Image (cartoon, helix red, strand yellow):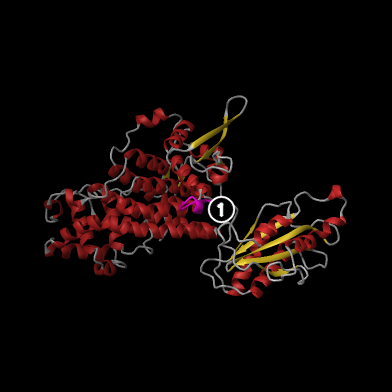
Amino acid sequence: MIPQIHKQGSHTLGLLYYLYGKGTHEEHIDPHLVASFDGMSPDPGRDTTATKEDLAQLLNQPLHLLAADQRPDKHVWHCSVRAAPDDPILGDEQWADIARRIVAATGIDPNDGAGCRWAAVRHADDHIHIVATLVREDGRRPDHHRSGKRAQAEARLIEKELGLHQVAPGDGTAAQRPTSAERHKAKRQGRERTAREELRETVRRAVTGATSDEEFFARLAAAGLLIRKRAAPSGDLLGYKVALHDDLNKDGEPVFYPGARLAPDLSLPRIRERWSGDPASDQEDTVRTRPSTPAAARRATASAAWQAVLVVEHGDDAVAAAHIAAAGEVLDALATTSAAHTRRELRDAATAFERASRSHVRAVRGHDRALRQAARDLVHGGTALGRGEDGASTAMAIDMMFFLITVAAHWHARKGHAQQAEAAARAAEHLRTAYRPAAAQPLGVLYARGRRLSRPVIQRQTALLRDTLPSLAEQILAEPGWYALAATIAEAETAGHDPAVLLSDAVERRELDTADQVSDVLVWRLRRTADLPADASVLPETATAGDRTTTRRPTTRPSTPGRRRNGHETPRKAR
């Protein structure tokens, strides 16, 4: 149940005409009064002798207790209360009780005998509108400070008592939701989303991996947005607004939105914080060797995500918050450059995670450089083809990002960030769905190779698995992906790695409880750590023979206890 406090107005009668009217698209059905301050207010909807003017005059009577120069200009308080889509349809008496509780909780009518006059109108199954005059019966102004938060708190209680869908409590860091007018406008224009939502996503993607104002605005222009910049008298850039070419107001002019109205972290000062820890100039970035292919960028992304998991699990809050925010950039970049068969789910994951990228824990930028660089590499690496090494490395990157996003959900849950934890969990489910088509072909190749391994090799690897991972061995051996893991172990041995070290490190350093199949996860972790091609089809059959005698070089662990990464001490996870 979502209460929304609308802007205060000056015309009670005008609002009543809208509430009792047919609506913009004749969506208002049977408008009628369900409750009022005295329980006897005239109802223009069902009483043929009552008029909207009668109701407006009754509500506005307390204004006349004040001298003309003391009457507030914005005296109309308006609150809508909407049920969740999956909630049952409530009766008029239930909505009447909800209205009385909301006006009491917000201070509009606190049951002290002298509250404001109000009326609740229902013109749809799923919501009501409450109209009130912001002058009490005793002539004083009501104490309705922070009425939005107070209404939300009461709504949470109502949900529990009525068994309704329980909305996760917010913390004020969510992006502003589209208004009713914006939603109706989008519907008239045949848009799936409002202009605000389209602009938010476009700006978010333009920020991904950017390192300067110039690059950011160039990306906005390339995306086809109209841009207005706000500069100080000195010429310093202070802010910006953006608009869609075809989103016009009644005068035929583009409707501009400041970055801060799209999302709290899309104001220009907050955007600049992202690259505050980046190299001082783009020249330093161009000197660094960038991944030249989509596959190389995805392998780099998997490595950055692998390291970020440990930071989010054990790092300082401000550093963890920076990595979580940067993970959102990686998801945006991955979605933008993904192949068609994974693009939709990855975009949905990025959209869902947007809410999880912000909280009241202020991110300290700079420590998240590796993830931001991964996002930049993905953008510059280009669009993946979805097959071969591109497809296999995409599966590897999605697998690593799934665990990073899952860890972010756990972090938010520990901090009591209910909306963020829920958003991260939804993003993880989209990643899980995107992983399946991405991994099907490369894992199929590995499975076929594993099935062709000789019996002695399989027996030796089975014994290795039971010795190295005794608590997981039987589960892994029962999974279809065991043969893909066996093929990967054989490749690692041929390349000179110690598979026992690889397996121990892969399991010891990361949780596996959320994995559909542990064998799949270990395949990608071993291939990344041992620097094996993600696409096994590029290897000759002898690469997985497993019977060759090789001189093994020591397999180094990707991170050691207490090592400083990105300037932050990250202790090893105790087990």
Query: As rendered, which of 133 and 529 lies closer to the eye?
Result: 133
Q: Check disc 1 and give the amino acid type.
A: Arg
Report which quarter residue 64 is drawn in.
Answer: bottom right
**Residue 30 percent across, percent down from the top left:** 62, 68
Task: Report the residue at 22% width, 62% height from top.
Answer: 464
Residue 507 seen:
yes
Residue with the most extreme top position: 234
Instruction: Give the left or right position of residue 150, taking residue 307 as reference.
Output: right
Report which quarter residue 4 is drawn in.
Answer: bottom right
**Residue 106 percent across, percent down from the top left:** 71, 61
Crowding around mark 1 (Cα neighbors within 10 Å: few <14, some 14 to 19, many 20+) is some
The stretch drawn in magenta includes residue 183: yes
Query: As rendered, which of 147 and 472 lies closer to the eye?
Result: 147
Label 1: which secondary element: loop
**Residue 337 percent across, percent down from the top left:** 34, 45
The stretch drawn in magenta includes residue 492: no
Where is mark 1, residue-wise? 177
Identify the image quadrant of the C terminus: bottom left
Task: Report the residue at 21% width, 55% height from top.
Answer: 488
Segment colored magenta: 182-193
Instruction: Give the left or right position of residue 80, taking residue 444 as reference.
Output: right
